[in-house]
Image (cartoon, helix red, strand yellow):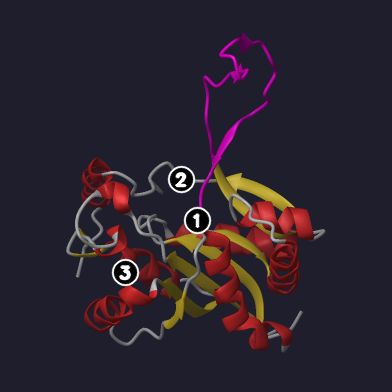
């Protein structure tokens, strides 16, 4: 590994976000005095070891994204990449943007993050980055109790499911293996549920699950914006 290599943080904002309502992509809706998407970008920008920021957007959102970056992230260098039809396509587009620097050894880890998770903390980002550098891959998760196995006909079956975890982002992986995995997946036409699904299928990296954060919620429905605002107020995190 290049001793001066740094991580790249990819913030995925190329979904439609229709379930939250409104006329625009949910990641550009206001939250605590700024847009949803700018919260996580600001957090990544302040984490030691993160040297590149990439924002993946829908082509029709590019002008809006540029306005948000100019107004809310002035002085912060963010590369904009157009996403694809599915999440994995968007991740691949970001990885191809980073590919020359990954191949040159300038980027050692890539952190993939959903823009709809604006409350990610610098502490969680740092923990994922450290674990990814140590193990090759890291995902944050929070325990989910009270789950059971149900058959297709609705019958409940007793089963030891172990500790079930709800996965969060950012998910971090060694950059070289991740890029290779995504190119192989594209060749096969495989689409995974998240970054870890593709990385574990097409690479030998060992993925660790580290403790996530209950406040690292995903904005999916309108009430999630209310909950997120309450978390921000409780934490005393200022907007602009």
**Disc 1 or 2, which lies upstream in sequence?**
1
Secondary structure, magenta segment, majority class:
loop
Is residue 91 at least partly visible in the picture? yes
Q: Secondary structure at mark 3?
A: helix
Name the mark on residue 38: 3
Percent x, y for residue 175? 68, 72
Residue beneath disc 1: 124
Q: Residues within 10 Å of mark 2 (few under 14, many from 20)?
A: some
Q: Nearer the viewer, residue 162 or 29?
A: 29
Cβ–Cβ under 8 Å for marks 1 and 2? yes
- The dot on residue 213 is 2
Q: CA distance from mark 1 to mark 2?
A: 7 Å
Does the magenta run of residues contain 150?
A: yes
Residue 73 visible in the shown view: no
- Left or right: residue 43 versus residue 89 is left
Sequence-earlier tag: 3 or 2: 3
Number of residue marks: 3
Whether pointer 1 and pointer 3 mark residues with C-beta atoms closer than 8 Å, the reply is no
Quarter of the image that includes the C terminus:
bottom left
Which secondary structure lies at badge 1? helix
User: Which stretch appears magenta?
Assistant: 142-169
Are dots 3 and 2 in contact, CB under 8 Å? no
Q: Quadrant of residue 94?
A: bottom right
The numbered dot on residue 210 is: none
Residue 26's spot in the image, x, y percent?
A: 28, 58
- Residue 35, compared with residue 4, is above or below; it is above
């Amino acid at each position: 590994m290049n001793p001066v290599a740094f991580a790249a943080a990819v913030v995925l904002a190329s979904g439609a976000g229709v379930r939250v309502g409104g006329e625009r992509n949910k990641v550009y809706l206001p939250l605590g005095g700024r847009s949803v998407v700018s919260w996580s970008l600001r957090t990544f920008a302040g984490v030691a070891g993160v040297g590149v920021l990439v924002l993946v957007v829908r082509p029709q959102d590019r002008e809006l994204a540029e306005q948000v970056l100019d107004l809310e992230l002035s002085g912060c260098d963010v590369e904009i990449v157009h996403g694809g039809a599915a999440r994995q396509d968007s991740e691949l587009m970001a990885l191809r943007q980073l590919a020359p620097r990954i191949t040159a050894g300038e980027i050692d880890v890539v952190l993939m993050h959903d823009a709809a998770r604006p409350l990610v903390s610098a502490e969680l980002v740092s923990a994922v980055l450290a674990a990814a550098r140590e193990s090759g891959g890291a995902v944050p998760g929070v325990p989910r109790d009270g789950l059971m196995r149900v058959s297709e006909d609705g019958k409940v079956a007793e089963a030891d499911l172990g500790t079930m975890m709800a996965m969060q982002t950012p998910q971090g992986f060694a950059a070289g293996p991740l890029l290779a995995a995504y190119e192989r997946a594209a060749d096969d036409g495989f689409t995974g549920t998240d970054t870890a699904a593709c990385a574990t299928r097409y690479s030998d990296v060992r993925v660790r699950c580290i403790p996530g954060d209950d406040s690292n919620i995903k904005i999916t429905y309108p009430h999630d914006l209310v909950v997120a605002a309450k978390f921000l107020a409780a934490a005393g995190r200022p907007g602009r």
